[in-house]
Amino acid sequence: MIRVLLADDQALVRGAFALLVNSTDDMEVVGEAGSGEEAVTLTMDLRPDVVLMDIRMPSTDGIEATRQIFADDASNGSRVLILTTFETDTNVLRGLRAGACGFLPKDTRPDALLNAIRTVAAGESLLSPGATKAVITRALSRPEAPAPERLASLTAREREVLRLVAAGRSNREIADELVVSPLTAKTHVARILAKLGARDRVHLVIAAYEAGLR
């Protein structure tokens, strides 16, 4: 059973999400937070699998709450999926850097939201088309910078794999393009994650674009 914590300052919104989540057979709402501070406290106390986090909340916003949740590994394995009506490049990048592993608009279809929760709970990451566009737009608007030192640790093949990850390719698509097995492609991605100290593929995309590797 996937345990979900809802964080939104609007009770009606939390209620709607709670009805949706609790209508499934594989997930349940274990808590509700009306502020960023409460979201941090409840995450530490309840250890949910997934936190659905709104950005705009009084006092501590959702992005700062996310940062606090992941500070000093206080998340205890919880993963944050941000839901918002404001998919600006600043919000998306701040949220991802704070530790969020997903970013979706609040008007996401119910079935898509439930699948997103399952995806995040399984350890994967996701970005809506709008959030992806925001990341790319921000990256392309900046002067191309030389790759940081940490990218220098990658082999030529790993840099090519990273470029394909940034282009949105799956492990199977990477394998097909490079004419290697899916297991080999998966191994390359795992090694890149380890070398760059990245949490997931979303953060690899950010690293690639910030380094001008596209």
Image: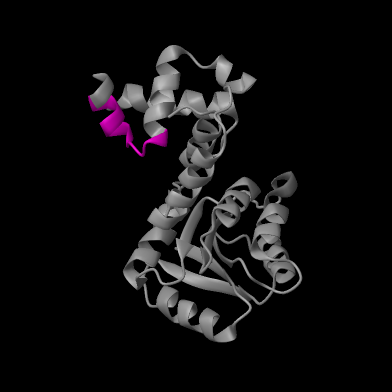
Which SS type dominates the magenta stretch?
A: helix
Q: Position of residue 91 (x, y in %)?
A: 59, 57
- What residue appears at the point 46 percent right and 39 percent down from the top-left corner? 201
In the image, residue 37 sits, relative to residue 163, either above or below, namely: below
Locate the C terminus and report the quarter of the image it occupies: top left
The magenta span reads: 166-176
Res. 7 image quadrant = bottom right
Relative depth, front residue between 115 and 162: 162
Q: Residue furthest bottom?
A: 12
Q: Position of residue 122 (x, y in %)?
A: 43, 50
Locate the N terminus and report the quarter of the image it occupies: bottom left
Q: Is residue 99 left or right of residue 26?
A: right
In the image, residue 213 sits, relative to residue 169, either above or below, namely: above
Relative depth, front residue between 212 and 41: 212
In the image, residue 37 sits, relative to residue 98, either above or below, namely: below
Would residue 110 be counted in the magenta stretch?
A: no
Would residue 171 be counted in the magenta stretch?
A: yes
Q: Position of residue 38 (x, y in %)?
A: 71, 71
